[in-house]
């Protein structure tokens, strides 16, 4: 999932450089959503992993 976030943020940067504002904003918002989902899943996996020990 972190890979998809990186792909969308790179797409947003490239689209922003070439002047496609709408595409850049859309890709940046998708990257932001995926990043927060990744962080939440990472924290959940850390918490559940510690319970097993």
Image (cartoon, rainbow, N blue to C red):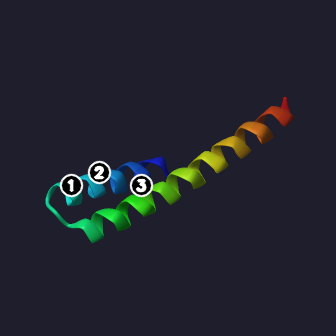
| Mark 1: secondary structure | helix
> Quick one: label 3 or label 1, which is nearer the N terminus?
3
Q: Residues within 10 Å of mark 1 (few under 14, many from 20)?
A: some
Question: Does residue 31 appear left or right of residue 18 in this picture?
Answer: right
Q: Residue furthest bottom?
A: 22
Query: Residue drawn 59% across and 55% down?
Result: 37
Question: Does residue 31 appear left or right of residue 47 in this picture?
Answer: left
Kindly report the distance in space between the C-alpha atoms of the residues bearing marks 2 and 1: 6 Å
Q: Which residue is mark 3?
A: 4
Question: Does residue 34 appear left or right of residue 3 in this picture?
Answer: right
Q: Which residue is mark 1?
A: 14
Please state which of the two labelled residues, at mark 3 or mark 2, is closer to the viewer.
2
The reply to whether discs 2 and 1 touch (Cβ–Cβ < 8 Å) is yes
> Quick one: label 3 or label 2, which is nearer the N terminus?
3
Residue 47, percent across and down? 78, 39
| Quadrant holding the C terminus | top right
Q: Which residue is mark 2?
A: 10
| Mark 2: secondary structure | helix
The reply to whether discs 3 and 2 touch (Cβ–Cβ < 8 Å) is no
Q: Residues within 10 Å of mark 2 (few under 14, many from 20)?
A: some
Residue 23, percent across and down? 28, 68
Task: Count all numbered tags in the image, as a single digit.
Answer: 3
Query: Residue drawn 47% across and 47% down?
Result: 2
Query: Residue drawn 16% across and 63% down?
Result: 19
| Mark 3: secondary structure | helix
Residue 50, percent across and down? 80, 32
Q: Is residue 48 above or below residue 8?
A: above
Q: Is residue 53 above or below residue 38?
A: above
Q: Is residue 19 above or below residue 42?
A: below
Q: Residues within 10 Å of mark 3 (few under 14, many from 20)?
A: few
Please state which of the two labelled residues, at mark 3 or mark 1, is closer to the viewer.
1
Q: Residue 27 lies in what quarter of the image?
A: bottom left
């Amino acid at each position: 999932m972190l890979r998809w976030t990186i792909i969308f943020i790179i797409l947003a940067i490239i689209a922003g450089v070439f002047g496609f504002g709408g595409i850049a904003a859309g890709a940046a918002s998708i990257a932001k959503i995926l990043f927060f989902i990744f962080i939440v899943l990472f924290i959940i996996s850390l918490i559940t992993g510690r319970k097993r020990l």
